[in-house]
Structures are given as C-alpha cells and as structure tokens.
Image: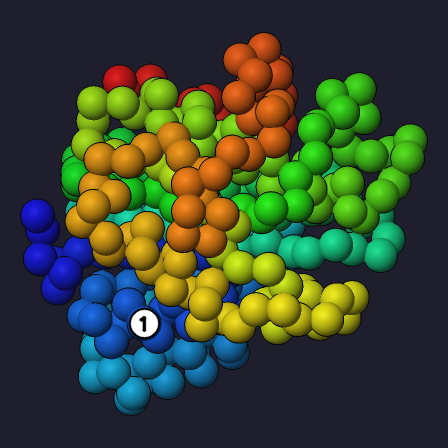
Amino acid sequence: MTAVTEQTVLITGATDGLGRALAHELAAQGYSLILHGRSAAKGQELLDELREKTGNQNISYELADFASLKDIGALADRILERHDRLDVLVNNAGIGVELARQESQDGYELTFQVDYLAAYMLSCRLAPLLVRSAPARVINVSSAGQAPIDFGDVMLERRWDGVQAYCQAKLAQISLTVDLAEQLAGTGVTVNALHPASYMPTKMVVHLFTPQSTVAEGMRNVARLITDPALAEVTGEYFDRDRRSRAGAQAYDPAARARLRELSESLTGVALPALA
C-alpha cells in the first residue's frame, strides 16, 4: 500500500462545508491535496489556513466553475499536465435544492451539470491517471435523496421541480458509480458512492432544512471510504453513511444506465473510459 505521504487526493468543492472539513482531516494526516473551488479568494484563504494549522505544504488549489463545461475540461487538463499520480478523486462539489430553474453557461439545467456532469467528466478524463496510480479510489458524494431520471425531460424544461433536479442528479452519480466500477474492474481502481449524513449544516441545507447531522459525521464517513484498508477492493457500492445499502432501482437498470451514458457523452463530448 502506498504511504499516505505519497498519496495525492483531489477534492472538488473544497472551500465550504463537507469538502473543507475533509481537506482539514486529510491535510493533517499528511496527504498531498489538490483542492478545487470557484472562488480564488476562498481558495487562498483555505490554503493559508491548512498550511498554518497542519504544517502540510503539499496542497494546491485549482479554480474552476462547474457551470462551465469548458472550465471542467480545463481543470482535468491541468491536473493531467501537472500531476504524475492521483490516488483518490472525491467528487464532492454540488448544489442543493434550488428554488428556481437555472441554466449553466452551456444551456443545461444547472443542478444536473454541477452535481452530475462535472463528476462524469472528471472521472472519465482522469481515469487513465488513476489507473496508472493504482491502487486508487473514486468516491462520489451522493445522497439518500434519489429520483429516477425522466429521459423525456432531463433538463426539466416542461416541469421544473428543485427536489427532482437534485434527486435525479444524485441518482445519476450512483449510476455513474456502477458503470465506472464495471468499466475499471481489474485495474486496481475502485469506485463507490455514499450518502455521508442527513441534512448537515452546510450552506446548501440551512436555507431550506433544519440540520440533523454534523459536518464531522459526514466527513468521517467520506474519509472512511478513502482510508479504510478493509474497503480496498470494494467497488460499485452505495453506502448510507457507513453501511452498504441499496440505491434507487434505476441506478442498477442496464438499459437506463446505457441511456444515461449516451446522454452524458453527447452533452459533454467525453466518453466513458475503455480501460478494463
């Protein structure tokens, strides 16, 4: 097993909430970190804070707005150019239940792009680097809130609903988890998804819901998927906090997953990696 101090972890959405807590935990353990966010000022603040509190200097920050497919692609390009290994990819960035429909810079429903398409693009683009760094892990931070995708109205143009937008994007993440796990079988790269905790007091929760869990609880459950040796060969699973669980049925439907793969490739121009 590669020593912690030699492992590199990419955390998307690292400047707030769960991502920020995870960055503190892993920096203190000695991991090299690539942290992502969409604010240069908040990124610099986080770097300064982590370096001062943990003494870990092997931390960098990458700026990208996931409302832009061009930004997501450029982020993948920079990581591939600047790093010769990637041991863990944590697809954590996301937005919660929105009160009104918004579109990305590419004209797609914003939640679907930020919560799902970004994870799809990064996972597919960075898969060769993860394979070269194996054993490696991909963790998709999903949710217990899941809903089947209506392939007739994926972008919710006819009937907008913020809960549906969030829940279908989270189910899409789990569908991606199952697909990538199958695709990367035998490469030494595992892919798992989890619901870290319910209604943590993050900025995506507090404006709509009463918090029920702590950020620390969610952070521990994500960190477990990164660090636990007992999970080294576990792949294609969905965890509810720290327990293996069963996601929404559509995530296991081969026909639905095939439709989602085809849609994702057509929207992003990125294909699922053929590495197995």
Horizontal and vertical percent position of residue 95: 65, 56
Task: Please identify the quarter of the rendering in which residue 227 is found.
Answer: bottom left
Q: Is residue 35 visible?
A: no
Q: Is residue 155 shown above or below 110?
A: above
Which residue lies at the image location 20% right of the left edge and 22% below the top edge?
186
Query: Nearest the camera: 118 or 19?
Result: 19
Label 1 neighbour load within 10 Å: few <14, some 14-19, many 20+: some
The number of numbered badges drawn on the structure is 1
Horizontal and vertical percent position of residue 101: 84, 48
Q: Which residue is mark 1?
A: 25
Query: Nearest the camera: 192 or 247?
Result: 247
Position of the C terminus by quadrant: top left
Query: Nearest the camera: 123 or 173?
Result: 173
Horizontal and vertical percent position of residue 250: 62, 23
Q: Is residue 178 shown above or below 139?
A: above
In the image, farthest residue toward the right: 158
Kind of residue at badge 1 = Glu
Q: Is residue 243 shown above or below 187?
A: below
Which residue lies at the image location 75% right of the left edge and 66% below the top edge?
209
